[in-house]
Amino acid sequence: MSIKQYSEAQLKEIAMLELANEILQESKNPVDYHSILNQIAEAKGMSEDLKNSRIAHLYAEMSMDGRFVNIGENRWGLRSWYPFDQTEEELSQANKTRKKKRKEEEEDDLFEDEDDFDEFEDLEDELDELANEEDEDFDEDDDEDEDIDEFDEDLEETDEDEDVL
């Protein structure tokens, strides 16, 4: 049934969702959301304020109703026009372009943050300090070994001196 066939009383009573369905059936092609909304508002005699207050409501209803499909770029069609696979492909292609853009932005953010913050910097500093402490410990051990060698030499000398006496 065409929108033109409804009386004014019927148009005021019929749901916006049903009118959207009628508009799409008449057009037989995807239609821009705002065009659908404007045609509904005109048919129902809605004021601009009322129309603006119902924008999100109609969009949410169309999104949840299985008869409608968002083709992308704010265009809507009827699900019956599209085989299931085709609709899924079109929607996934529209979403992929957004994901790539977001992914590139996230990568840019990562590179910017890399200069400001290195998450392993503190760990690297601690490891460097520990390595330096160990090097110092080894140096001290070497000094102790030298002291022991000198002590052993002194003992040998005193033993030799005693043997000579």
Image: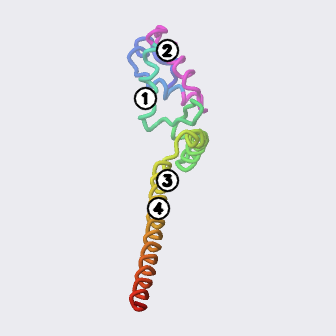
| Left or right relative to 117: residue 159 | left
The Cα atoms of the two marked residues, 1 and 2, are separated by 17 Å
Circle 1 packing at 10 Å, graded few (<14), some (14-19), many (20+), is few
Residue where numbered disc 1 is placed: 60
Please provide the residue range marked out in magenta: 24-50
Q: Residue at x 57, y 29 (%)?
A: 74
| Left or right relative to 128: residue 165 | left
Q: Which SS does the magenta portion mostly show?
A: helix
The Cα atoms of the two marked residues, 4 and 2, are separated by 83 Å
Label 1 sits on what residue type? Answer: Ala
Residue where numbered disc 3 is placed: 124
Residue 43 image label? none
The Cα atoms of the two marked residues, 4 and 3, are separated by 18 Å
Whether the residues at callouts 1 and 4 have beta carbons within 8 Å, the answer is no
Q: Nearer the viewer, residue 61 or 151?
A: 151
Label 3 sits on what residue type? Answer: Glu
Label 4 sits on what residue type? Answer: Glu
